[in-house]
Amino acid sequence: TQPDAAEGARAYSLDRGSVFHSWSAQRSLSPLVIAGGEGSTVWDYDGNRYLDMSSQLVYTNLGHQHPAVIEAIKRQADRLVTVAPAHANLARGEAAERILARAGSIFSKVFFTNGGADANENAIRLARLSTGRDKVLSTYRSYHGNTGSAIAATGDWRRVPNEYARSHVHFFGPFLYRSEFWSDSVEQECERALHHLERVIQAEGPASIAAILLETVPGTAGVIVPPPGYLPGVRALADKYGIVLILDEVMAGFGRTGECFAFQGFDVVPDLITFAKGVNSGYVPAGGVVLSEAIASAFDDRVFPGGLTYSGHPLAMAAIVATIDAMEHEGVVEHARMLGDEFIGPGLAALQEQHRLIGEVRGLGVFWALDLVVDRETREPVSPTIVGRLKDELMQRGVLPFTADNRIHVVPPCTMSPADVARCLAMLDEAFTAVEAE
Ligand code: PLP
């Protein structure tokens, strides 16, 4: 795509005139107009190129414009561009088969949705129907999507103006750096967080609780990697009290943590998995729920009262099949793990030594957060102004970051080259130097 300044100006003015944006007051927005992209790079209409350290909204796990996925979408478009969910379709069957082959032997079916929120919505519905119970427990530090139950299950501020669905209860998960449990070791944090969860279950009444819904690794909340033993402990509590365990892998799944499914690195198996984003790098909107045989078979002779017009849309399904195949053929998941272990993790740790604003570095694979603080002793978060300044400095240096609250998230495509990771790290170093000097 050749940048064309006039087209860029038109794209910007149409956006500002006619497009209503997510999660924003509209007046002061000034969105970057992206003209094209390839691999880990995007460019605007003025010829500026940016390394995409955000994977957009943490979903282009294969990078931009992967040729095999684009080709598969085109082939499917030529063959059959749409089909209703009640009909069988080869691309949908192949997508389900590929996902199940990677999820593990207890899983037997996939229900496809349009994205992550409706995946969680339907997982909650499945848990409620299969247990006959109502309540859903989830953590304060979480995001599960912006539909009825998904936003009510969300822990962060986005829940509060949207709390229309009922029977959602929140608790605190483990987070040693900002512990709610006065812990001073990982082991203590894990043990106390599990104790707290069991007390919440008991106080709410186990017989009223359908599901515990957790992001395997809470993402937007700050890439909060659970301590070893926490998720197996939650699994044990779910089993003890007959509660369905739903792991939300919308952001963490499909390579981001250096595993196909993030839970595979944490010695736990849920009853339901929700996914979206990385399953097809977001090339065509898609998400879904992977069902255990035990839950799926409960609907063998009973109607599942749920459905979506575009469930299993052929273009999205073709993109899933091609994405999973490309991940396999190109060793993408292993590459993501290697980038985390050998480049991003050590590189960010070295930056932390140099820059006092970096309070903690957390993550794995291509899923990292820099928790920025005014003071390393008190761990007081930096203001939005500091994060905004860092973002500007990074953009000026050709790096597109993902920021949330007091954090910069380092969440590039799983396919980024070590040389491009090194460039991101060098630009982060320069940006911190510039802002700390002020
Ligand atoms: N769950 C998690 C963990 C997410 O990060 C997101 C989106 O960022 C969602 C669910 C919602 O997905 P969607 O925006 O596709 O509905």
Image: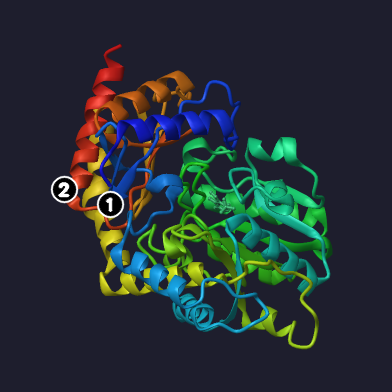
Residue 38: mark in rendering: 1
Provide residue 53's location: percent of width, then percent of height: 33, 43
Residue 419: mark in rendering: 2
Residue 73 lies left or right of residue 155; in this view the side is: left
- Amino acid type for the residue under numbered disc 2: Ala
Which residue is the extreme one toward the left? Answer: 419
**Foreground: 375 or 309?**
309
**Residue in the picture at 62% in, 67% down:** 310
- Amino acid type for the residue under numbered disc 1: Glu
**Foreground: 309 or 372?**
309
Provide residue 272's location: percent of width, then percent of height: 61, 70
**Residue in the picture at 39% in, 25% down:** 376
Instruction: Tell me the quadrant of the picture where the C terminus can be found.
Output: top left
Counting residues from the start of the chain, the first of labels 1 and 2 encountered is 1
| Camera-side mark, 1 or 2 | 1
Query: What secondary structure is found at the residue carrying circle 2?
Result: helix
